[in-house]
Image (cartoon, rainbow, N blue to C red):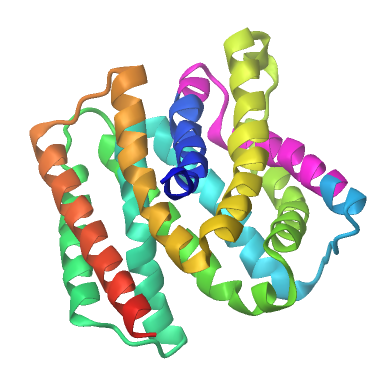
Amino acid sequence: MIEALVPLIPQFLWATNFVVSKVVISKGLHAMTLTALRWAIAGALLYAYSRLKGLRVVLSKELLLPSLTGITGFSALTYLGLTYAKASVVGLTMALIPIFTSVLAAAFLKERLTPLLIASVAAGSTGVTLLTLDSSGLSWLGALLGSLAALDWAVYTVASKKAMRELSPIESLTSNALMAQPFNFLLALPFFSLAPMADPEVLAGLLYVSLVPGFLAYFLWLYSVNLVGAARAGVYINALPLLTLALASASLGEALSGPQLAGAALILLALALVTLDYLKRLSTS
């Protein structure tokens, strides 16, 4: 029973990234600066760990697209989304990741697009549309950017399949984090300012998202995969939107509007459909 709960721990830690980063950004640290600084700290720790363990660190053109999507693009789009929308809204858009991944895999890897996946695409697309209908400021833009972050991660997942056959997950993550650094700081340059870190809450938040979701959670995830197996562990990733929604509601007091609640319900339905499809494929493989 305890083993079944272990894979939820890294999902919980990744969910805190949305909540803590929302606070940090709301206090003046620009999303692009947060992206650059977070991965500079996490990347340095990953590099030190890899060297101590004798793991490979590869810098090659084959890893350029995974680096730009999995590190730079995903983080930047997520944090920009948090600039305009609630953490709960941006977190909910992460439910689109397995849907986008399935569609891209069908298009580029010739994997089958099942009726359940088609239904999940329809429900998820409608759900995100409803999320963007909130009339408060630019919340619609935050939902859109979160959806683009989910699409970006799906591109990363498909693009990194070859690299993941040659590198371990930690070797791949470390290599991608290091290769992304120049792009992270180049994009952050027009907005770069360390002044907001004079606020202890901002500094503490930056260190937290760098050390916990950016470093520790990955090791706990790999431990979970070794504990329960990759197939079973993969299902737990779908808990991230729900955990983010619960955390944002409890810690930030966020509440969804009527259209957003309907959108959230459709997105969770889409997540249930894609999870059911995944479990069916596991049972027949």
Q: Residue furthest front?
A: 1
Considering the whole magenta stretch, tell me its main secondary structure. helix
In the image, what residue occupies the spot 76% across and 50% down? 182
In the image, what residue occupies the spot 69% across and 42% down? 39
4 horizontally vs 35: left or right: left
Count of numbered tags: 0
198 horizontally vs 248: left or right: right
In the image, what residue occupies the spot 16% across and 61% down? 123
Q: Residue furthest bottom?
A: 110
Picture quadrant where residue 246 is located: top left
Q: Nearer the viewer, residue 281 or 68?
A: 281
In this rendering, the answer to whether 85 lies above or below 60 is: above
Task: Please tell me whether residue 29 belongs to the stretch shown in magenta.
Answer: yes
In this rendering, the answer to whether 25 lies above or below 71 is: above
Picture quadrant where residue 98 is located: bottom left
Picture quadrant where residue 92 is located: top left
Q: Nearer the viewer, residue 259 or 221?
A: 221
Q: Nearer the viewer, residue 203 or 77?
A: 203
- Where's residue 59, x and y in %? 82, 66
Q: What range of the chain is rendered magenta?
A: 23-48
Query: Can residue 189 be seen here?
Result: no
Q: Quadrant of the C terminus?
A: bottom left
148 horizontally vs 56: left or right: left
112 horizontally vs 224: left or right: left
In this rendering, the answer to whether 116 lies above or below 222 is: below
- Where's residue 49, x and y in %? 83, 46
Query: Can residue 104 be seen here?
Result: yes
In the image, what residue occupies the spot 47% across and 86% down? 109
- Where's residue 166, x and y in %? 73, 77
